[in-house]
Amino acid sequence: MSTQRIINQYQKSANVSQITEALLKEKNHFQISNLVGSSVSFVISETFKKANRPYLLILNDKEEAAYYLNDLEQLLGTKNVLFYPGSYRRPYQIEETDNANVLLRSEVLNRINSRKKPAVIVSYPTALFEKVVTKKELEKNTLKVTVGERLSLDFVNEILFEYKFKRVDFVTEPGDFSVRGGIIDVFSFSNDEPYRIEFFGNDIDSIRTFDVETQLSKEQLKKISIIPNIENKTLEENRESFLSYITSKTIIFAKNITLISDKLDKFFAKAKDDFNGVSKEIRHLKPKELFCDGSFFKKQIQEFSLVHFGSVNGVLETSQVDVIRFNTLPQPSFNKQFNLLIENLEAYHKAAFSNYIFCATDQQAKRFQDIFNDSEQEVHYETIVFPLYQGFIDIENKIVCYTDHEIFER
């Protein structure tokens, strides 16, 4: 497969080996320069395989994070990559909480606590701005259920009410539960599918996931953890920053620390304004108990192995760090002029480069074949069905990776 040939090139790359070696040192800080577009994704995925340590990748905003998430999921598999988003649009506006995002955040915390093999966590400033409940508080607010254990249906029912779950006829979203006969359906904030718990008297007889649309059972499970909405900002549990929550072995890749810090300061100033405007009839936690500002983030990030992969301006002003230099160029603009694209590809082919065009669908790949056939010129390239974020040219590895959406300027 063509993607594997590109991966093989990065596996053999001297720079990738140098990064892997640098990551073996505890709390090492260094910079990767001249790495553009989705070449970042290939380098991160290959070093992750070799490092065998958790990664936290901090992008500049949610959109950019989502694009890199898609790259990495395809390169590493969805089980090895997690998305850690913000839970709401505005501080102290509980009704604007996004349950889908709360679910994703809880899944990440649950994965960290489960001590499963390391994963790449992809995030952005808004998400890191919010503090999370401590591991101790999360443990206290987690109901663990195992097949075969003695546990009464009434007890589980009471616990779910205590966790602020909502009893409904049919479970459709996180925070819902329903009871009928000896069965409890519950949609935990720690899993993207609800659970069906079947009782036999006071024993747990079976646990399965099920499909919300069809209500049909799916995967059989031996044990589960049921977690409430831990992002509820009216709860008074102790909270800590996400950087305090993750293991100290985590390697942080940050695109622009200065930009991240400035954004956190702006968010924190807004949170203070919002706090001053909320009703005093309900006790709300103060901003410093719920959120992180820029200086707090910059201080904490020093305690980890830290890799800067954006511009030099994104490096902390006080840092004197080693630099590992790549030689990559962004995909040029062809303004939909396919004669320019053909000339470009042939020039790189003559220079012994391998040309790849990444396409979102098979139809797009066929479209390029038709365009090049119509040109009646020999064009040396391969199409790969893989919706890559951004194209790039890697001079050192002699690879050209272009994307269909950039060629067609979509």
Image (cartoon, helix red, strand yellow):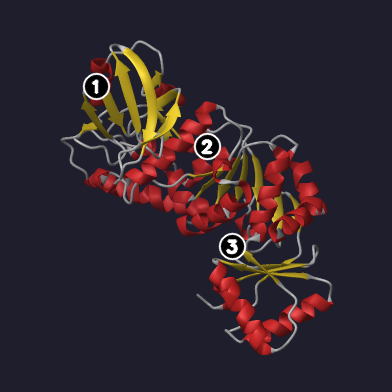
User: How far apart are the two marked residues, 3 and 1, measured between alpha carbons?
Assistant: 46 Å
10 Å neighbourhood of mark 1: few (<14), some, or many (≥20)?
Answer: some
Question: Residue drawn 41% across and 26% down?
Answer: 225
Q: Where 303 falls versus 389 (above or below)? A: above
Q: Is residue 254 above or below residue 135?
A: below
Instruction: Name the image quarter holding the N terminus.
Output: bottom right
Q: Amino acid at mark 3?
A: Leu
- Identify the element where label 1 is drawn: helix
**Relative horizontal placement of residue 396, taking residue 370 as reference (left or right):** right
In percent of width and height, residue 348 lies at: 78, 76
Q: Residue at label 2?
A: 243
Image position of 341 (left or right of 65): right
Q: Is residue 398 left or right of residue 32?
A: right
Could one spot residue 33 in this view of the protein? yes
- Cα distance, mark 2 to mark 1? 34 Å
Q: Compared with residue 22, is residue 146 higher up or lower down, i.e. above or below?
A: above
Q: Quadrant of residue 288?
A: top left
Residue 333's label in the rendered image is: none
Task: Name the front one of labels 2 and 3.
Answer: 3
User: Going from the N terminus, do you reach mark 2 or mark 3 first?
Assistant: 2
- Disc 3 residue crowd, few under 14, some 14–19, many 20+, Cα 10 Å: many
**Residue topped by disc 3:** 388
Q: Does residue 264 appear anywhere in the picture?
A: no
Of mark 2 and mark 1, the one earlier in the sequence is: 1
Circle 2: element type: helix
**Marks 2 and 3, Cα distance to the nearest angstrom?**
29 Å
Q: Residue at x 47, y 33 (%)?
A: 109
Look at discs 2 and 1 and give the one toward the viewer.
Answer: 1
Circle 2: residue type: Leu
Q: Which residue is the site of mark 1?
A: 157
Q: Earlier in the sequence, mark 3 or mark 1?
A: 1
* Residues under numbered marks 3 and 1 in contact, where contact means CB atoms less than 8 Å apart: no
